[in-house]
Image (spheres, helix red, strand yellow):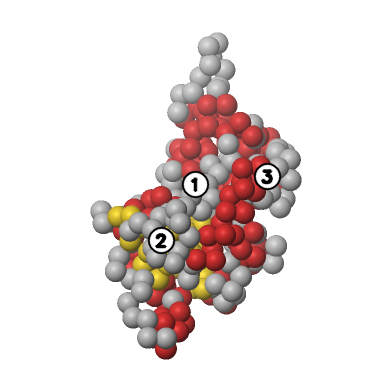
Amino acid sequence: MPDLHWYPGHMTKAVRQMKEDIKLIDVVIELVDARIPISSRNPDIDSLAAGKSRVIILNKADMADDKGTDAWVKYFTEKGLIAVKLNSRSGNGIKQVKDAIAKAAEAKMARDRARGILNRPVRAIVGGIPNVGKSTFINSFAGRAVTKTGNKPGVTKGKQWIRLNKQVELLDTPGILWPKFEDKITAEHLAFIGSIRDEVIEKRELAIKFVGELEENYSGLLAGYYGFDDIDKNGDDISFAMQIIEAVAEKRALIKKGGELDTDKASILLLDDFKNGRLGKITLENVGVWSDG
């Protein structure tokens, strides 16, 4: 398990840069993974975006429980954020995102009109931790019409703006905020979705944790997906999870030389199937448990 205080130096620089960039921005758009909406946030963004209009997008909603995602949208809305769900790969939800940005920019537009400024696009920035789908979102939002509009008069030199549509310009910045591991479970959840480098956590250890969580909330899902009989829980959590991993190895014919089941390959397969949404709609963080954490 990684050091929970691990925070790469280049990400400290990225936070500093974002602090500067946000001064130019009307709306801060934050992407999170709908399967783990709290773990995939960065606590820095609330302070970085203080005083700015906010939109939070629960991306990869196609991979998450619809009921769970709706509960998170309600939770963030009650916190004063404009929250929407999105599948940026298919574009399902893009209209709602556009409406959310327009809503977030209403006060800014009213101020512009009062000062006689008409038709100035809303300036936005997209932030989020690695692997929540920022690039896919930007491409989906803009379609094929992504063009850099160049330096703007009165704006810091060197800043490039992407015209997403007539109403919105996006500051061309990576917008990457590295996750901070507030606790061990947060770190595990980030590893499940691939936001932590593969070598940080040993795969079989991670798969055991994943199977344990899944069986607690979605009992029998793995047996149904991989086609083995339900396994009765006898003994501790680790031995139960290992029995399931062994069953996956057996069903997928993952065998080492000598006939031993290859539980390492089965662990990688399990995690990959979750990461890519093959196991179905799964939400690992529920509002009632995580919202106060």
Q: Is residue 276 left or right of residue 14?
A: left
Residue 270: x and y, percent?
51, 37
Position in image of residue 244 (x %, y %): 58, 36
Relative height, residue 136 to residue 229 (above, below): below
Q: Where is residue 263, by image quadrant?
A: top right
| Residue density around tag 2, few if under 14, some if 14–19, many if 20 or more, within 10 Å | many
The amino acid type of the residue labelled 2 equals Leu
Q: Residues within 10 Å of mark 1 (few under 14, many from 20)?
A: some
Q: Looking at the rendering, in which quadrant would you find the N terminus?
A: top right
**Residue at figure coordinates x 49%, y 33% from the top left:** 269
The answer to which of 35 and 103 lies nearer the viewer is 103
Q: Nearer the viewer, residue 140 or 165?
A: 165
Report if the CB atoms under discs 1 and 3 are less than 8 Å apart: no
Label 2 close to label 3 by CB (< 8 Å): no
Which residue is located at x 53 percent, y 50 percent? 176
Res. 113 image quadrant: bottom left
Q: Secondary structure at mark 2?
A: strand
Single out the residue that lies furthest toward the bottom.
114
Mark 2 or 1 closer to N-term? 1
Q: Residue at x 57, y 26 (%)?
A: 264
Badge 3 element: loop
- CA distance for labels 2 and 3: 27 Å
Say the numbered circle drawn on residue 131: 1
